[in-house]
Image (cartoon, rainbow, N blue to C red):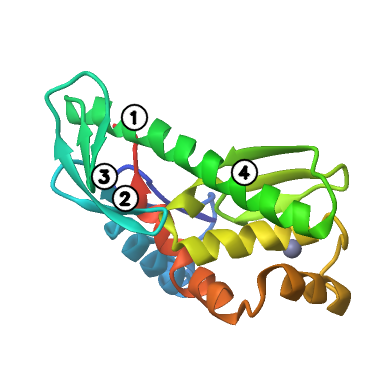
Amino acid sequence: MTLRISRVDGAVTLTVPRGVSDREALAFAAEKQDWVLGHLSQQAATVHVGPGQTLNVGGAQFQLVAGAGKRLRVVGNTIELPQPVEKGRLHLLAWLKEQARAELTRASDHYAERLGRGYARLSLRDTRSRWGSCSSAGALMYSWRLILAPKSVLAYVAAHEVAHLQEMNHSADFWRVVDQLYGPHQEARAWLRQDGPKLHRFRFDA
Ligand SMILES: [Zn+2]
């Protein structure tokens, strides 16, 4: 038996193989109730980003408004989005990724210099399972959504991944390197645990 939740409209579909009774099928569905409710509540919180909303970028709050121009424009703490709204969203996504690349490059360079080690390259993705990674070849990968987190949290993730250039594990030695580079990191880690998943509620597709 499989239970699926549509990403589009939240419809829940239970697929039951031949020979399974309704009673068994409903018992299976009841068992998965928590999982279903968890997913539905997350979906309910989905935000299609657009004019009228505020967005935290690089630790500062921006107001999103409908602009008259063909391109995204930042004026003070206002981001003017081109119309129509779907187009504005794509422009905003591209702009956010640019900001993320700049900030994560700056932070990674800073910590790599302090550590006295270079990294091979830096790439951005939209990963749900991790905020960053560091390969044995020294390639850093980050979630671009870190630009939506407080500055101190973005900095912590960069320090964490750069520390892996020296220690490819999460040993006590590794955490000593993080301490040296970043300092106390309890708060940043707690923020990622509690508030990090919320960064995924922003959607930029049509
Ligand atoms: Zn790690």
Asked whether the beta carbons under mark 2 and mark 1 sit within 8 Å of each other, the answer is no
Find disc 1 in the rendering and name its residue: 90
Q: Which label's residue is closer to the chain start, 4 or 3?
A: 3
Which one is nearer the viewer's eye here, 32 or 27? Answer: 32
Which one is nearer the viewer's eye here, 145 or 1? Answer: 145
Find disc 2 in the rendering and name its residue: 11
Left or right of residue 23, residue 67 in this image: left
Q: Is residue 134 above or below residue 80?
A: below
Q: Residue furthest top?
A: 70
| Residue 176 visible in the current orientation | yes
Residue at (81%, 76%) from the top-left corner?
Answer: 176
CA gap between label 2 and label 1 equals 27 Å
Q: Which label's residue is closer to the chain start, 1 or 4?
A: 1
Asked whether the beta carbons under mark 4 and mark 3 sit within 8 Å of each other, the answer is no
Mark whose residue sits in front, 2 or 1 = 1
Find disc 4 in the rendering and name its residue: 105
Quadrant in which the C terminus appears: top left
Residue at (53%, 65%) from the top-left corner?
Answer: 153
Q: Residues within 10 Å of mark 4 (few under 14, many from 20)?
A: some
Q: Position of residue 28 (x, y in %)?
A: 49, 68
Write down which quadrant ligand 1 falls in: bottom right
CA gap between label 2 and label 3 equals 19 Å
CA gap between label 4 and label 2 equals 41 Å
Q: Which label's residue is closer to the chain start, 2 or 1?
A: 2
Name the residue type under label 4.
Thr
Q: Residues within 10 Å of mark 1 (few under 14, many from 20)?
A: some
Q: Position of residue 80 (x, y in %)?
A: 20, 35
Name the residue type under label 1.
Leu
**Element on which disc 4 rests:** helix
Left or right of residue 73, residue 51 in this image: left
